[in-house]
Image: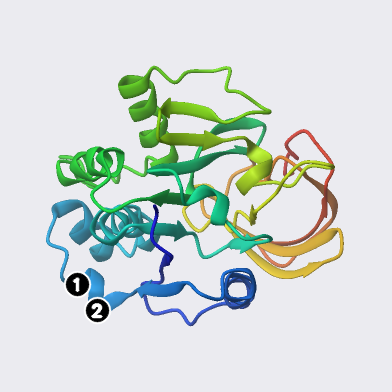
Amino acid sequence: MIPKIIHYVWIGDAPKNELLLRCIESWKKYLPDYEFKEWGNSQIDGIDIPYVRQALEHRKWAFASDYMRLYALHRYGGFYFDSDLEVTADIEPFREHDFVAGFEEYQGNRYPMSAFIGAVPNNAIIGDLLAEYASLSLVDRNGNLDLTANTKRMTLYYARRFGLKKPYKTDEPTALDSCSFIYPVHYFCTPAPHKKNFTIHHFNGSWLDGYARRNVLNMSGYTLCVFKDRKKANRSLPLTYNESLAMMLPLGFDLRLALLRKGTSRQPFKVC
């Protein structure tokens, strides 16, 4: 059985934002008998591998957390939650697995998610992924940062190790082996009408290389957020699969205030 432990990572010097605090409230509401373990600056300082050291040196907190979530799960077992993951129901049914995760959809693409992962201690899948990071470098020989998302690394691993390839199943769990499962999008990422849902991934997106996105306010059916264009170039806004742009106002050269409508599929919105 997967232990009743929730791991989350909050490193860097920023105070906890409103979204994280609201998500933690949802964890405590639906999982009142779980232990909550925060992995912060003091814990990560004890991790001595090049990838993590480089992520901290370059203030790439999300990439440091890619390793930390695996380390925590491998050592203690339990569930890892991203800081923008809201719980909507008790996750007890999934504790019987040795490993559990879900698929998510982002900008119309479906792939295995890293925002929700559950595992028993010393799980082989987590161990394999952990070993990959031990041999990685965030900085290449030319000094460029390798900002490959952990979801891409996991997707490649699942394909290589288990033969998991597109098209992925949409309405039933995918078995990696007899004790390891990846569930459809509506279970742990984006709710769907008349289908089971246990968590919602809000895609706060601190790792995005093009736009930085910060959710300011969540309302019924809408999200108010700020986008910062890191590269000062026209590109599509990083909306989630079920979002559409209702309104946008420029706040300066590289900042935009956007009102997003939830529950509506859309094509990527081109910024002009």
User: Residue 31 placed where, x, y %?
Assistant: 57, 69
For image coordinates 43% across by 74% down, the residue present is 36
Q: Which residue, given by chain and number where applicable, does mark 1 sit on?
A: 45
Q: Which residue is mark 2?
A: 42
Q: Are marks 1 and 2 in contact (CB under 8 Å)?
A: yes
Is 20 drawn above or below residue 160 in the view shown? below
Front residue (pair 42, 1): 1
Residue at 73% across, 36% down: 268
Mark 2: which secondary structure? helix
Q: Secondary structure at mark 1?
A: loop
Residue at (71% x, 64% y) in the render: 225
Residue shown at the point (36%, 35%) measured from the top left = 153
Q: Amino acid at mark 1?
A: Asp
| 253 to the left or right of 60 | right
Q: CA distance from mark 1 to mark 2?
A: 5 Å
Residue type, mark 2 in image: Ser
Give the side of residue 156 with respect to residue 116, left or right. left
Q: In which image quadrant can residue 158 be found?
A: top left
Looking at the picture, tell me which residue is in the foreground, 1 or 200: 1
